[in-house]
Amino acid sequence: MASFARKTSNGGVALSIASEDDSEKLSADLALFLSNPDLKAALADGSLDLTSYSSTINAELSTLERECIALHRQAAPDTAILREELDAADDILAGLQEMLLGFQADLSGLSGDIRQLQDQSRSLAVQVDNRREAEEGLRLFLERIVIPPNMAECICRGEVDEIFLECVKDLEEKFAYVQMTEHDLDDPACNDPGFTASAGIPPAYTVAGREMVEHLLKLRLQAVDRTRAYFLGVIKQLRKPKTHVRMLQSHALLKYEYLVDFLLVAAPRIHAEVRDVYVESMSKTLYTLFRTYHKQLLLLDLRLATRVDLICVEEAALRDAFSNKVNLSKKKGDPFTIGDRSKVLDGAISSESGGDLSATSSPINAHMSLMSGDKFSYEMIFRSIMSHLLDAATNEYIFTRQLFKEYAIGENDCWNSIFGKTLSLILETLENYLFNCHDAIAILLMIKLTHYYKRLAKARRIDSVMEPFLDRVTSLLWPRLKTVMDAHLRSIRLAGPKKVGAGDIHSHLVSRRYAEFTCSILLILNRGKKSPAEVDGTRSGVVKTSAASESDKPSYRGSAGDMLVGDLDMMVEEMILLLKRLADVQTTNKKRIIFMVNNLDSIINIFKERRVNGKELNRFTELLVQQRELFVEEELLQTFSKMIAFVTQTEAHMSGISAPRGSRGVAGKP
């Protein structure tokens, strides 16, 4: 009521507002009242008396109010104590607030100091990085231009060794660096950290760079002088006798290949001088070595044939000094039988079948052979010289191109300058020897060896320099072989009973010589043409009795071998004519036939022993069959002469009757 009265004293508007508040409160109370299910049910059925219920509620509220007041009175001391404690806590919190405000002020000052320190730290870090970059750039720059005392000492007074080589490399790097200009800086290929350290200033434009150029030039000239003296000293040792040339080349020259390149850049005239001195020294050394070696090998030459060692010679030249008999064992085979001489081609033939081209026998040791008194045929001497020559040519070809960087081939090439005199010497000595050489087997073996060395030179990739020389060798050998073959052929053509002696009905020495010589030529010519696994032919060991087909014949088309095959064909026919001339000396027809049979059989047996097959063997086999038929007829003629005469006359008479006139043939013996 007091609240209501107070509101009414304020005017009508206030009263209206209070009424609205009471209405809202009443609505809330009603909603709370209705929320009780029991009250809501009692109100619904009309059993609830609101007046009595309100009184009850008011009584309960009064009771509760009195109890609450009593409780407050009981708790008054505790409430006073709590009030005192709250006041003390307020005082403490006020002190803490003041302290925290002080701390906040202090922290604000520290934050500013920290930010200042951070800024200073970043500035100092940038300065340190700049100093480090500047120091690194300056260090690189100084390392590139400054000459260390130990490097100068090594170049001026040290030995020419690996350390000297490294010092010269460093010197060239420094000299190239101090000469770099703006053009070099603009080059994309130039990516040097030393440039950025000096803000892109070229070393040639710096004061230090211009100052160090003179000192580097002086030291460079000193290095050139020391290098020149070293190379000339090593090259001088090449001229000394018994010097291991390859050892010096490998360990004293190629080991310092960079120094030769250094001379080419720093002093081209000195480089040309060193090159010319080396070329001259090696030319003289190789010339002396091959001349001495060839002279020693000529002392070991086993002269197997002279100008009188032809297939047909005068019988007096073959007679023993103490008797009038012909010494067949003494003259059998030497210049005509190949024997073991074909072993000189073992390495060459193995290379044709896919073997190693370098798999040749060892060259002759002239010193040891002279001490032991060994003798060799000239093809062995030729092979030893050519083997040494090809090895030396290969070594110098690789060495000069690696050391002097010369890959052009011409008159001014190192290799040609070095080997010019040596090759001329070998050609001259070969030509002199061939002038008096009458050994066709040796010449043909040398031709085979020359063809092998051509393949070997191509395999070693030195055919560009060796092939012209080998072609010259071939051009010397083939004409001489033709001359010797013509001499043998002429000896057969001009031979007769008076010259070689008629002998008895046994095999003549001329037949044996011819068979051995022809077999030797064919064995060499066909060596390597067919493998043993192929069908029966010249290398299979089986002798054909029928005519050889064209596919079985070895091909020499397009080579000088055609000439040699033609000479052998002519020699076959001339040998047959010679045997007939020698047979005509015999007193009876039977002896003539026996002489032919014995000689043809001897020739065929030698062909079979040497396992040589071909048209030559077939030709002699056919003649032998004919002579044997004649011998059978001759034997029958002695026993059944009358019967044979009757049969012959009857056959002639019958053939004359049956044949038309004008077409009657002439009967003759086969």
Image (cartoon, rainbow, N blue to C red):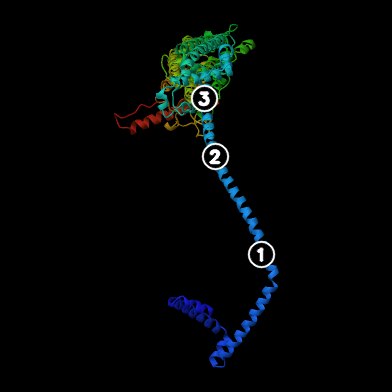
Image position, residue 304 (x, y; %): 54, 13
* Residue holding disc 3: 138
User: Which-is-in-front pick, marks 1 and 2?
Assistant: 1
Question: Residue 152: horizontal and vertical position, in percent?
Answer: 56, 14
| SS for callout 2 | helix
* Amino acid identity at mark 1: Arg
Q: How crowded is mark 3: few (under 14 residues within 10 Å), some or many (20 or more)?
A: some
| Residue annotated with mark 1 | 83
Tell which of 667 and 415 is nearer to you. Answer: 415
Q: Quick check: can you spot residue 221?
A: yes
Q: Which image quarter: residue 493?
A: top left
Residue kind at label 2, given as amino acid type: Gln
Tell which circle, 1 or 3, labels the residue nearer the N-terminal end: 1
Asked if disc 2 and disc 3 are in contact, CB closer than 8 Å, the reply is no
Disc 1 to disc 3, how far (Cα)?
80 Å
Residue under label 2, please give it: 118
| SS for callout 3 | helix
